[in-house]
Amino acid sequence: MADEESPTTGTGRRRARGPEATARSEALERLKARLRGGRRSDDGGPQIRLENPIYDTIPEDEYNALVAKRREQAQSFIVDDDGLGYGDEGEEEDWSKAGFTLSDESDDEFEKPKRKKVEKKDPHIKRPSASSASLSAAASIMGANRLSSMFTSSVFKKRDDKSCDSIIDDVIAEFAPDENDRQRRRRVQLNSVSSDSGASEAIRINSGFSEKPSIGDSPDSIRGYTVANCDTESVRAVKNTNSSDLGLEKNYDTFKENVSCVEDGKDFSSENGESSIEQVQPNGHLVEEKVMKEIEVERNPATKNEVFTLNAKVSKEADHGLSATADWKALKSGGVENIVAESKVVREASNAEQYSEFNLDKDGLLPFYLLDAYEEFKGVNAGTVYLFGKVKAGNMYQSCCVIAKNIHRCVYAIPTHPLHYTDEIIKLEKDVQESQISSADFHKKLQDAVSGLKNEIAKHLLDLNVSTFTMTPVKRKYAFEHSEIPAGENYVVKISYPFKDPELPVNLRGESFCALLGTQSSALELLLIKRKIKGPSWLQISNFSTPTPSQRVSWCKSEVIVDSPKDIKIPTPSKTPVEIPPVVVTAINLKTTINEKQDINEIVSASIVSCNRVKIDTPMLASEWKRAEMLTHFTVVRKLDGTIFPLGFSKEVTDRNTKARSNVLFVESSERALLNRLMIELHKLDSDVLVGHNISGFDLDVLLHRSQALKVPPRFWSKLGRLNRSVMPKLDRKYKGSGASHGIMSCIAGRLLCDTYLSSRELLKEVSYSLTQLAKTQLNMVRREVAPHDIPKKFQSAESLMELIEYGETDAVLSMELMFHLCILPLTRQLTNISGNLWGRTLQGARAQRVEYLLLHAFHAKKHIVPDKVSIYSKETKLTKRRAPNGVDDSNFDEADIDDANYDNVAFNGDNKKSKKTSSYAGGLVLEPKKGLYDKYILLLDFNSLYPSIIQEYNICFTTVERSSDGSFPRLPSSKTTGVLPELLRNLVERRRMVKSWMKKESGLKLQQLDIQQQALKLTANSMYGCLGFSNSRFYAKPIAELITLQGREILQSTVDLVQNNLNLEVIYGDTDSIMIYSGLDDIAKSKAMAGKVIQEVNKKYRCLEIDLDGLYKRMLLLKKKKYAAVKVQFKNGTPYEVIERKGLDIVRRDWSLLAKEVGDFCLSQILSGGSCEDVVESIHNYLMKVQEEMRSGDVPLEKYVITKTLTKPPEAYPDAKNQPHVLVAQRLKQQGYSSGCSVNDTIPYIICNEQGGSSGSATGIAQRARHPDELKQEQEKWMIDIEYYLSQQIHPVVSRLCASIQGTSPERLADCLGLDSSKFQHKSSEALSDDPTSSLLCSADDEERYRGCEPLVLSCPSCSGTFDCPPVFKSICLLGSGKPTSPGMEDSNYNFWHKLHCSKCPEEDGAGRISPAMLANQVKRQSEKFISLYYKGLLMCDDETCKHTTRSINLRLVGDSERGTVCPNYPRCNGRLLRKYTEADLYKQLSYFCHVLDTVSCVEKMETKSRIPVEKELMKLRPVVDMAASMIQRIRDRCAYGWVKLQDLVITD
């Protein structure tokens, strides 16, 4: 506002200024003069005090009266504002209301707006100060957006007014979107703000900000500022005690601003001559400047504040040419957008052909390629199956839905008395075979035989109101675990009735039948099994009808109805089309914000990238699918609630769509409109596959929940799938990584769901499975992440909003590229074709279901009745009544969760009463390793597919293994008939062998296709055993699983015996299906020849089992079970090369920092280098000293301190969250609005820190000091890395374990090299020795070595109560007799004890301090009882040095091969094992040491004959004194069973 623009009356005349207005104007002039540097005060800084406020305030009721008065003057108040259409009726606008229209006018129309003012009638009424019309226009456009940044744009740079900009903010406050905003602006208090920018005598505040302020910049890199070298100066704003309402938006403790310094004495002003004061938030955003009632600006003398910096290198990741966003932009500029219009024409043409006729074959049958299937479990459509796939219409393939109706249940009633074994039935069967009676007569007699059973079943069916049913006797086999059902072949009654009628109870029993099977079989299962449909394949549809458009129930282009499932057939090979139709794949990515009040995700943009004609039978190269004619994309974005889009965004949208010649960017005003638009556009694409990263756990869940909350019509949200629904299914929340819930899968029925997060977890082994990590490691791309709380900031400028849109499209493309890279579609299709289940379930990772359907198809072909499986809805009904611990609802687990949870651990699972991770039977055999460092060649021999091979070797199957009724252990089958399982496995193995032979002749894409096929066959065969030992499996058979693992243990043990006894070779380790043989050879050829000989000897014992050379190791460090590292020799084109292989070591676990892993790798490379022990130890010590110096000096990159750990449940569900660092970090992330990265199965990165200025190893718990790496980068001045923690808890444990078997170093020495207190690690040396069971044996030649670590015998004086260590009798006599010096740990006076038998501290004259034999015996007994009590206390300690959990309780959980009672209570956070803190070996060793101290007999026998006589004379004098104590301690020791061996356990006698 220029000075000449004084307020005017309603008639346009200039109104005379009053005294108050004049005072305000003069105050503003003085302020501007100060800021221009016109003059300076003597005290070194400008000080301005405004005695009176610039504007007035009034009560709310007076303001309401003013509003009413303005309404009356509305007609004269409306002004057009140069095309903006702005009209003010005197009342406040609610910009958040719907219906507010956006202006599409250009920015030039805002440059010179005009606005009439209302005459101020009441001088005490607070109103907006006179201003240009731009203010009101801006307020009306921006709504609740921050407005002060608008005044730095080019729209307002051409103004001529020179008034103080802070008054503008008071005007803006009156145009705030709601009352809360106005109250917030009025009530916020002013805090003192300080700046460390510089201390020069003069500063120049740069007001030349760029038009679009940067988003997300750091505080010291704000766009528009220039930085020069300057001293430190503190500038603070002081609040006058009289000013209580300063109108500031926020309080700030710190005010940081980059300024450009000029020479002392020069003026400071803005570039355009106007003074401008800008406050800057710590996050780099501008804060509206405010005019306070009284302002006092002082310049203080330069002061030095202590500044803390992070003690690690923070590297800024550069966005190089591998940027995923840049790659996507290049892909679009390369032609994608130029053909979008063409793609749209194709889509519209295909839409026009929606009801076009499809092609039929020459027999009038409809060739239909099946992709997905769905059935309704409840309601009038129960039992109806919807098949979704492709049909050919003209030269194109289009979507089609086949509705299969009238599928009937198939229930088998098992007679109580088997008919097959009756004399009458046996005679009738014989007569039929001899043609003495007809089949019809035989069937009639069978009907008569089961008439009683049929009548009883009919009564139960009529009770359920089932009116239509059929019953007929059939011959079926049963071979499973139901003890009431007789095994073998028998006649049963087959019951068939419609699915719309209620199911018979599972546990129904009767007088004439003992069980019902098939009551839980679904219509979809019966259709797939009976029609022999095995995954995506061609089908022939006959006798179909086409519904009218009003009768259609799907969104597919074509729809047909069949009234009988028998009209769906598998075509013969000669009639099967050769071509496999391509599919349409659509990637979805959502950007959401968090509604803090409701704690829900709200969608702000949805990006779609679609790829047409995707091959599903072979891999696709990037050059194939990254082509212009293959890709289509678009994004739908909405404005934030209560705001509008930033200036210039409309032009960007228009330009983008014009360039693409189609709508690739849709702009909507609300979230509901966004969802409607998204569903419409998705429907046009007619997608077959939806792909996304965590699309199962986030994107679809948010889409459907928001559609439900915003009441999106069913005709829109149902287009997410292919069924036209009217009611949304129940949406259950599921944990990330567990697949989509049943509700979500129902909503998208007809479209396959490819979640790259789930697939990558199954196919890859990564530290983290985030899209950022996978893009980096798998695609070599750099992905830009946008934090949820940063998304609203992207709406502050058109440029940043376009960046957000680019990021969304990039994420969609990355998920699609990851799908192609991992060949997910071809691989899962092959797996589904082999197993015969649904492709959609395979994509969701349902491995248990794959094996289940493979067995269902196999047993149905053999006329077997299979066990029942509880249906989805039956499970949900039961699970809804259960609540998981800590308030987590179990109802969100459906069939997939129960089937596939912990499927990897099936080898050790037991009955249903056990927990999921509990073993109820023994697993594989793991031999005790011979620990140490081996420098000769070691052979690793491995059985190929041990468990599947055992099944084939011994013909183990449900149909061959006889199970006893008493539950005793089964025996190997004696049946010569090949079982179903061995036959299935042999078929899979032969097919894989055939495919691998084909691979040798192929190359290129054909080779990749065959490789995918052989991988699918291998995965299926190896997972076959799992269904037997998995308690939730439909085919769970614990006796058979036990038999298989027993044979595995016997085979491994017999192999070890053969190698050691027959071949005289040394086996140093064995685990489940492999053994390690120490060759003792340096020659690789001789070592391989030795391996060949072993292989030949072992393999000739078996028919199907094969052992092979799996690894050849040059050197190996064997630490313990399942933990070793070795130099493996591999061959490429006949040339050997070496790699280091690590198994089970800390450096391969995720919960260790990269720094610890690097240090461990270096130590391991040195140990396995083959150098001398001295050189290895020296290099390790030097390296550790170098590392700790770099750490303490802050030269180690921050990324190397990151520790990662996976969430196994939601962060809020952890009862001990305060003790787990990753849980607390995840909870903070969730509070900050992150929707991903803090859910179940997410990997949480964190760093252990200390507060700046605090001591390392603070008393605060480790978990409380854990911070996310991004938190550290943002708060570098607050936190610092806890160096001591990383040295003592990360690096030292790793190194000490690796070096445990290396001579020349110790835990104390390693700690000293790391700058740690070595005394704290002394106990680890003794622990390392005690780990070796041989160290506790009392067979060492040297007594000092034998009893090392034992506590001394401490005697107390009866007179002075002093204590002293009692030396061994024999050693004391020998040392004093020979005059040799005593050992440094024992005083000379103590060795004189056995000569004088009294305390050395008491005088000898009075006889004080003499210890009698009884006293000696009692003190020895008391001390021995102390150690016995310590043993029976039963303390257990975890062997993990980072845990050291001590307890007396026994954990009965079993994990892996661990013994019962040894699992750490902190599992799975700790993988350590509980060991007795004081073992029976320690007790026996201690008691033996006391016997050694008092020994006067056996010690003489060890001496040479010539030296015995003088020593024996001295001992004879002491025996009467010592005998009582010696005999007593020997009796106590002999009671210890540890020292006894029962020969009857070793020798078998008659």
Image: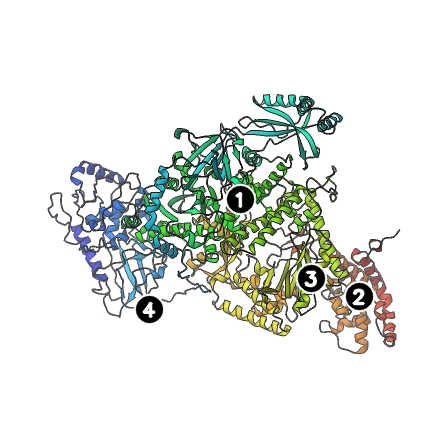
Residue at (54, 32) in percent of width and height: 523
Q: How far is mark 1 from mark 2, CA to CA? A: 69 Å
Q: Earlier in the sequence, mark 3 or mark 2?
A: 3
Nearest-to-viewer mark from 4 and 1: 1
Q: Residues within 10 Å of mark 2 (few under 14, many from 20)?
A: many
Label 3 sits on residue: 1092
Pointer 4 and pointer 1: residues touching (CB < 8 Å)? no
Mark 1 touching mark 2, by CB under 8 A?
no
C-alpha span from label 4 to label 3: 78 Å
Tag on residue 842?
A: 1
Q: Which mark is residue 1492?
A: 2
Mark 3 residue type: Gly
Q: Residues within 10 Å of mark 4 (few under 14, many from 20)?
A: some
Q: Quadrant of residue 938?
A: bottom right
Question: Taking 874 as reference, is 1549 left or right?
Answer: right
Kind of element beneath mark 3: helix
Q: CA distance from mark 4 to mark 2?
A: 77 Å
In the displayed structure, does residue 1519 sit left or right of residue 1143?
right
Nearest to the observer: residue 202 or residue 321: 321
Marks 3 and 1: which is nearer the front?
3
First in residue order: circle 3 vs circle 1: 1
Is residue 730 visible in the rendered image? The answer is no
For marks 4 and 2 on the same chain, the one whose residue lies earlier in the sequence = 4
For marks 4 and 1, give the CA distance. 66 Å
Where residue 1005 appears, x then y in whole percent? 49, 54
